[in-house]
């Protein structure tokens, strides 16, 4: 969603800058991942939108669901999100925070969709080729989706490399339809 990403961007950038200055990027990364997962839960979203709960109650509820040790300034961050009704942006904030972290480290996340499970050797071979193509160190996130029939679909940032059989069949269909 473009709107959520626009709202989340300043939060992610400010949080990343603070975490980098305090050398707590890794800690914030795991906390944000957990908060994103919690706030993605439909029940949590419903409670966060419940007008019968005060903002303090919402924040306390959210803090009560967190298992990781929170950085010292996490309470202030959650206050800000709850106060501005931005808890639903946590997944997007976490994603943008990770993008900033990866960019700073000179790496990126490669979302790889395959039709079949890949062995570790196949993943390493694929990553070697992809790192040459994209020019950065890649961290793979692999998903199996048999609807692509064969091949792989790789997304790195806003770039997509789709060599799946499904994509080839779609291109063939479109070519035949225009003739």
Image (tube, rainbow, N blue to C red):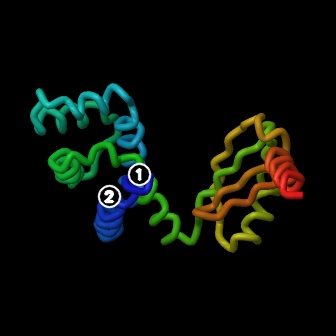
| Left or right position of 67 against 166 | left
> What is the crowding at mark 1: few (fewer than 14 residues within 10 Å), some, or many (at least 20)?
many
Report the side of 55 relative to 34 (left or right).
left
Picture coordinates of residue 166, whole percent (x, y): 81, 44
Number of numbered discs present?
A: 2
> Looking at the image, which residue is at 30% across and 60% down?
11
How crowded is the residue under tag 2: few (<14 C-alpha within 10 Å), some, or many (20+)?
some
* Residue at x 49% of width, y 62% of height: 99
Q: Position of residue 22 (x, y in %)?
A: 29, 66
Nearer the observer, 137 or 174? 174
Along the line of sight, which residue is nearer the eye, 98 or 8?
8
Q: Is disc 2 in contact with disc 1, using a CB cutoff of under 8 Å?
A: yes
Residue wearing tag 1: 92
Q: Is residue 145 above or below residue 30?
A: above
Q: Which residue shows up at 80% across the image and 64% down it? A: 129
Between marks 2 and 1 in the image, the one whose residue lies nearer the viewer: 2
Q: Position of residue 17 (x, y in %)?
A: 32, 69
The quarter of the picture where the C terminus appears is: bottom right
Element under label 2?
A: helix
Is tag 2's residue or tag 1's residue first in the polypeptide sequence? 2
Q: Secondary structure at mark 1?
A: helix
Residue 178 is situated, as x and y percent measured from the top left of the image, at 84, 57
Which disc number belongs to residue 26?
none
**Residue 23 visible:** no
Rounded to the nearest angstrom, the CA distance separating label 2 from label 1 is 9 Å
Q: Is residue 134 visible?
A: yes
The residue wearing badge 2 is 7
Q: Residue at x 74, y 60 (%)?
A: 161
Q: Nearer the viewer, residue 60 or 160?
A: 160
What is the quadrant of residue 33 in the picture?
top left
């Amino acid at each position: 969603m473009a709107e959520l990403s626009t709202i989340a961007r300043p939060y992610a950038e400010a949080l990343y800058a603070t975490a980098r200055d305090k050398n707590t990027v890794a800690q914030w990364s795991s906390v944000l991942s957990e908060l994103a997962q919690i706030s993605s839960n439909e029940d949590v979203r419903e409670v966060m939108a419940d007008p019968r709960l005060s903002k303090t109650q919402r924040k306390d509820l959210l803090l009560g669901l967190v298992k990781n040790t929170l950085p010292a300034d996490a309470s202030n961050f959650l206050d800000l999100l709850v106060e501005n009704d931005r808890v639903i942006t946590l997944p997007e904030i976490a994603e943008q925070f990770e993008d900033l972290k990866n960019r700073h480290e000179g790496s990126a996340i490669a979302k790889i969709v395959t039709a079949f499970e890949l062995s570790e050797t196949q993943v390493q071979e694929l990553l070697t080729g992809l790192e040459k193509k994209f020019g950065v160190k890649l961290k793979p996130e692999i998903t199996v989706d048999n609807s692509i029939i064969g091949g792989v679909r790789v997304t790195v940032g806003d770039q997509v490399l789709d060599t799946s059989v499904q994509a080839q069949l779609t291109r063939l269909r479109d070519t035949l339809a225009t003739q």
